[in-house]
Image (spheres, rainbow, N blue to C red):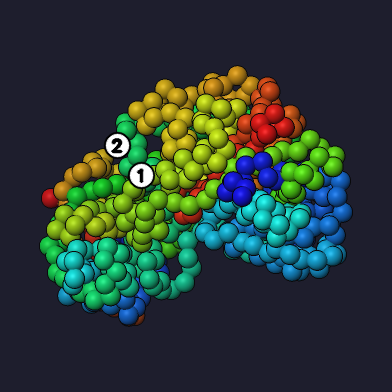
Amino acid sequence: MSQRTLRGRSAVIGIGETTYYKRGESPHAEFKLALEAVVKACEDAGIAPRDIDGFASFSNDRSDPSQLAAALGCRELRYANMQWGGGGGGGSAAIGNAAMAIACGSAECVVVFRALAQGQHWRFGLGPQANGVSGNAAHTVPYGLMSPAQMFAMKVMRFMHEHGVRQEALRAIALASYHHAQSNPRAVMYGRPLDEARYDASRWITEPFHLYDCCLENDGAAAMILVSAERAKDFKHEPCYVLAAVAGSQYRAGAGVHNTPDYASASFKTVAPRLYAMAGMGPSDVDVLQCYENFSGGVLMSIVEHGFCTPAECNDYFTLDNLTAPDGDLPLNTSGGNLAECYMHGLGLNIEAVRQVRGTSTAQVPRVEVSMVASGPMVTPVSSCIFGSEATI
Amino acid sequence: MSAPYLADGLPIPLATELDRPFWDGLRQERLLLQRCRACHRFQWGPEWICHRCQNFDLAYIEVPPEGRIYSYQRVWHPVHPALRTQGPYLIALIEIPHADNVRMVGNLLGDPRQAVAIGAEVEGVFEQHAEAEPPFALLQWQLV
């Protein structure tokens, strides 16, 4: 009887991204963007699109797997999966779902993808435009609480209050992302550096979030291809193994109208221990972290809940030096992440994590063996994954 | 009657089968929150089942509109056309000690630029929107 784990059972063999556009500026339809990212991932892997037999996405992706399979000439569709939950909480979960399908023999070659064209479709950052709202929304929207930033700001405010965390800790997260984006020509904010003074002078969106604490809104698509560990060595790149991928949230994380018992949380407190248990390692083994930034304060709580520092240590731990490659203790969001590279609902973070294992990041950390991603703080379910090099297997 | 805290034109609350007693209560200037008839514990937002004992028999019980600030945010960036000229406004998350510390979202009345203290005691203010179609009331909060 094999052990019930995903550790080392599958690997990423290909990654692909479209050009990343500012929101609404994609010249292409969302579905075409999805196809382009998948085809690029196939080229990167050295595999024909028709060999894909599974699709996994998250966050209500609109690109239907059956239509994708038809367009790509896939010989057979074996697995079509989408992770529940809004926002980017499903990024690592989709990888876990792909890894599960492969480990169980349900599919051979699964592509994880996410495509977004907010010009063609609805913009995230806007409130509802209807005349009336019902259900839980009726208990928040009429009070002017309706955007993602507004849904999460009070969690972060409470966390900062409970633990005496200063605004400078959030600022360090934004500065790290922008710092790394300056070496990444793919980044939407490439060539647009950020410093402390500019952050401090930037307008508030909603306190405690300045403009630069908030993710971008972009059009584009990203994809990664997974196969079994046995097959993974047959392709162009050294395999990037999935050491763990887990999803979930704590007791009543989904309680309505801001009534989750553990309010000041990124929702990783139950997820992180399972992640490390599956990977057989702990936070001190992690060489580089990509941590989903819908808002900087969520990154702060995610990093605490994954055990990198305690709440009391936040003011000392969250500094630009500590969070930047190549020398920081915890190089963070080395592509620029959702704040400064692109907001592809976080899947770009997973792709960057693979790049770090391959050694091809534009902000490369030396000798990366263990590369981690935390997806989607403060939503439910959230998810995390850990990738490893050949040496970790 | 004083003017509403936020500019006119935001989506208005529409009662459902689940929360109609709450909205009817606000119009009568009474705070009615959901409580389980079996375990007598409050819960919020409205649910179809008691999340503690899974009993479906739930009642709406009147509680004094008193609370304390659990968290807050000062919103500056308008995300709805109705708020374009609003300026900053305060949203507060209020714990209700008389109802097992359930939390409610509302606006904190007064100067929107005031310093806000988490833990401060507040009392409810019923904000009537009698001209709306359908009419409704919101529950706002002010420092005691």
How packed mark 2 is, by other alpha carbons closer than 10 Å (few <14, some 14-19, many 20 or more), is few
Q: Residue A264 carries which label?
A: 1
Residue B133 is situated, as x and y percent measured from the top left of the image, at: 34, 80
The residue indicated by pointer 2 is: A162
Residue at 70%, 63% (x, y): give it.
A79
Count neighbours of disc 1 (C-alpha within 10 A) and say few if under 14, some if 14 to 19, many if 20 or more: many
- Please tell me which residue is depicted at 70% across the width and 29% down the height of the picture: A391
Q: Is mark 1 on a helix, strand or loop?
A: loop
Give the residue furthest to the front.
Answer: A1
The answer to whether one can see residue A124 in this image is yes
Q: Nearer the viewer, residue A144 or A40?
A: A40
Q: Does A166 appear above or below B115?
A: above
Res. A233 mark: none
Relative placement, left or right, of B24 versus A234 is: left
Is residue A299 visible in the rendered image? The answer is no
Disc nearer the start of the sequence (1/2): 2
Direction from residue B28 to residue A336 in the image, left or right? right
Q: Position of residue A340 (x, y in %)?
A: 61, 38
Position of A362 relative to A269 (above/below): above
Q: Which chain carries label 1?
A: A
CB under 8 Å between callouts 1 and 2?
A: yes
Question: What amino acid type should be assigned to the residue bearing mark 2?
Answer: Glu
User: Callout 1, which amino acid?
Assistant: Ala
The residue drawn where x is 43% and y is 28% is A309
Spatial CA span between label 1 and label 2: 9 Å
Compared across the picture, whether A181 is left or right of B16 comes to right
The residue depicted at 24 percent of the width and 53 percent of the height is B94
Position of residue A87 in the picture relative to residue A253 (left or right): right
Toward the top, the furthest residue is: A327
Q: Where is residue A233 in the image (x, y as percent from the top left)?
A: 81, 40
- Label 2: state its secondary structure: helix
